[in-house]
Image (cartoon, coloured by chain):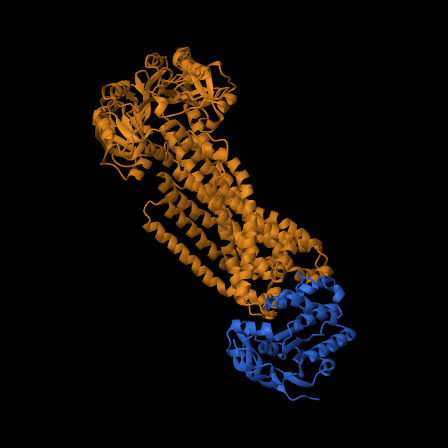
Chain colours: A blue, B orange
Amino acid sequence: MAAPSPTIQIRVKDLCRTYDEGDKQHAVLEHVNAEFVKGETVALRGRSGSGKSTLLNLISGIDAPDQGEVNVAGLNITKMSERDRTLFRREHIGFVYQAFNLVSTLSVSDNVRLVLELNGVNDPEASNRIAELLEAVELADRAESFPDVLSGGEQQRVAIARALVHRPSLLLADEPTGNLDDKTAQGVLQLLDRLVGQTGGTMIIATHSAAVASYCDRVLELHNGALVPPTT
Amino acid sequence: MPVLFRASFGYLLRHPWQLTLALLGICIGVAVMVAVDLANESSRRAFLLSMDAINGEATHQIIAGPTGVDESVYANLRVEHGVRSVAPIVAGYVRYADTTLQVLGVDLFAEREFRNFSLSGRNENSVVGSRTGDGSAIDVISSILTIPGALLTSERTAQTLGLESGDEFRVVASGREQDAVLAGTFSQEEQGRLDNLLVTDIASAQQWLGMLGKLSRIDVRIRADDTALLQRIEAVLPPDTQMLSAAGRTQTTMDMSNAFLTNLSAMSLLALLVGVFLIYNSVAFAVLQRRGLIGVLRALGLTRGQTFALILLEGIMLGVVGSVLGLVVGVWLGEQLLYLVARTISDLYFVVQVTDVSLETGSVVKGLMAGIGATMIAAAVPAIEASSFQPRLALTRSVLERRAGRSLPIVAGLGLFAASAAVFLLMISGDNLVAGLVALFLLILGFSLVIPIAVRSCSRVLAPLAGRLVGTSGRLAISGVGASLSRTGVAIVALAVAVSATVGVSVMVDSFRGSVSEWLGNTLQSDIYVGVPRGAMDPDLLPDLVAVPGIESYSTSRRTWLETEQGRVRLVVLRMAPGSYAGTSIRNGDEEDVWRQFDEEGAVLVSDPYAYRNNVGRGDTISLRTSGGDRAFHIAAVYQSYDSNDGAILMSRETYDVFFDDPTINSIGIYLGENADADRVMDQLRQVSAGRQALIMSSNARIREMSLNIFDRTFVITDVLYWLAVGVAVIGILGAMLALQLEKARELAVLRAIGMTPGQMGGLVTIQTGFIGLLSGIAALPLGLLMAWVLIEVINRRAFGWQIDMSIDLGVLLTALMLAIGAALIAGIYPAYRAASARPALAMREE
């Protein structure tokens, strides 16, 4: 696979996605068009079920659209094979989820190491990067702890470290503060903003919160699976 | 260890119950297979070793009809024709201290080229073949040659019998006590090969076994390229003798037990098959419960191939650990089964003495391959499923169940295809036993694949009914079975297959027993049976016995072996009393005409197994080696018989006397007059025979009881094997229920939170497991009956030639149903307890 351009630009064109619900079909995204330029931070706002997570999944190649295409850095990922999409995602995209989704059987440092191992980063280099990032998320002293003994905020900081450790060009965050109290949420957002800013990458945050959206450069509003002009 | 693997395998380490059950499933499956294989191979090996020791370097054996080879044949070969590489042998059995011992009478001077028995003691020396020897060896040799009844045996046998060198004792041969003295023992090296064997001088053996002037055989040693010698010997042999390959004779004897050993192996494979279901169950659960983790890994960039490899590698690791544990347990179990296998072989085929399991590399490799292979196959399906997950974390239970539900018709279709293939295979495979067993396994597999779709239908239909009867718990429990088919389906199949095996084997054994019992009832027409175990009745005693008052008539029986082109065959020679004819059930032909041919025209009858194995029947002829050489005998009819696996030929005494120079009678059947008392007659018979010959006397009822006891004994090992299969299935249900409960921990916690009592929770799990048991039991009945039919009409027919009338006892079916429900309920006790005692807040937080 050809290496993508270092300047990631995302273009979403006429994207549609429908899911089966028993005998019926439910349209989650309908003809969505959007563009994202390198280095910007974009909030995807909308109510539950508006299609935010689905759009993130399609942008990352985790899911495939029924119609339309997603171009990332000039590469049409919707035309890629499932394997190529996986390899692309592995190398260029980082994820932060609302439910943290840490691997409970691995320690904090191993959770972070997992992505580097998948990317074939050698051990001394991996150890340096892990130490650096855990320092950055202020969890250096919890490196050998397991996720189930960490607070929600700490778990989300581990997830951020995992999402950024392989230096992705694009960070996708799906309700990253949904499970956190206001103060912790604020800390997490500041951390995300700072670290993504340092890497110069693009960040798309799916959220229903206006407070979270206020951290972003611009806001896209999703309503019933379609993008609408922002209300504010 | 890579982080990726730790992430995945860590799950199993954190759920030790599930890990243990998965390992147990593999372990028991492998253990049963290895145990049966080791027991079979050890018995086979023990037999071959002992035959090797007894045959020695002989390449050929000269044998004759029922009375043996005339001594003059040996003298003629050695003296007249100068053939030096021959040795005379007299073989038979004696009893001492309730033990049957094989006697080998040899000519020590002719033995040098054939056998080399090493003596134990201060100066170990060869009894035969030692040119110089020393004092101790020469003493032993001279004892054997000069003292009547002097013999050698292995140290272990001597110890078992409580004998030491120099001890004098009395053995019973052909019902007569004979003097014996232990002249020496073989060295340790001979242990195992020569256990329960007494080696004596040929003259002593002839004396004991009533074979004066006769030999059991003449061993011959001929170089492979010396066809001239072979032809020269054959040319001078009298017409009643024949020369056969020694290895061929051993193989023929060994082959007799092959069908039995193959059936045992098939039973052990059944346990492994149930084990495979459980392994699949365990691995599938482990995968399904980690779908969140797999989703995360896939989102982070794990490819489908890597996901597949990860799950498969995990399966292989489980397979290796479980199989190694299975090997250890298998060796132990093999030691327990060895006794049963050896006893059954001795009861049915030939005497085999085996005390130790020999750890065969082949058995170990087979066990490991089967365990790891089965685990890989079982893990491949969930691995494919896991790798096909879309890397969306929101892959819900309902999506999974819907997917499982959609695949049910395809799975059922595959089942029907497998069943059709089984029927086709049965139709085209003639009398091939292995093809029959493959067809049986295909039928089981085919039926198993149809069970899940039936379970879903039952669950849907019965859930509302359960709701009305038991309330919400009942409805939730019953609908939960169908709604969680991806978890419950395989457990139900595993239990159903195990229970169906109990139905199939029980119906087969009961039908077989019923047929044998009915046959015994018909065959045992005489009131009293008198005979000599492994020997001939004293011809002078017979007239005195039958003259006892109260005896109205009697029949005589001679049972011997003949070598035919098709191998060894049992020849039963009867002089029938008027009441005896009704005891033989003729399969085809007009009875009056058949008996006329039998009595007056020299025709013979052949038993069912003989007719089946040799593809002969009424109107055909068979060639037998008589005292005057080969002669063709007309087959008047096929008769029902269960007395020999390899079949028998029935010949009238009159015909036998014409063609065989053998007056021997082994037993008589006595018919009493109307008012005669059987016990009193037996007392008188004992008085008449006292001091002349020790006879075994049994009433009709006693013989019948003993025969059925032997029959039951031969099926003990079958019982053991199918109970092991049930054990494997119970573990499967336990695993399934625990996994289901783990899976539904949050759901159950919510039920507790909204007001369900611990009792109701326990009840819910109990109803669910009971329902699983009930469904398994119901599925097991038709499958079991189908298995019984195949076992009776195909497997037993092809393996042994038996014709069995299938009879179904409702008790067997009810027991199977109870067994399935009981097994499931037992497996559900712990999950029910856990469900009842779970703390809802904790369960919801953990989720």
Q: Position of residue B419 (x, y in %)?
A: 40, 54
Q: Quadrant of the N terminus of chain B?
A: bottom right
Q: Is residue B576 above or below residue B250?
A: above
Q: Is residue B344 above or below residue A25?
A: above
Identify which residue, B117 or B340, lies in the foreground: B117
Q: Is residue B818 visible?
A: no
Q: Position of residue B328 (x, y in %)?
A: 55, 42
Q: Is residue B690 above or below residue B713?
A: above
Residue B695, quarter of picture: top left
Q: Position of residue B687 (x, y in %)?
A: 42, 11
Q: Position of residue B669 (x, y in %)?
A: 35, 21
Q: Which residue is depicted at the point 55% across and 81% down?
A: A70
Identify which residue, B48 or B629, lies in the foreground: B48
Residue ranking furthest to the right: A183
Q: Which residue is depicted at the point 65% across and 68% down?
A: A125
Q: Which residue is depicted at the point 51% across and 59% down?
A: B380
Identify which residue, A214 or B459, lies in the foreground: A214
Q: Quadrant of the C terminus of chain B?
A: bottom right
Identify which residue, B643 or B269, lies in the foreground: B269
Q: Is residue B160 visible?
A: yes
Relative placement, left or right, of B634 versus B609 is left
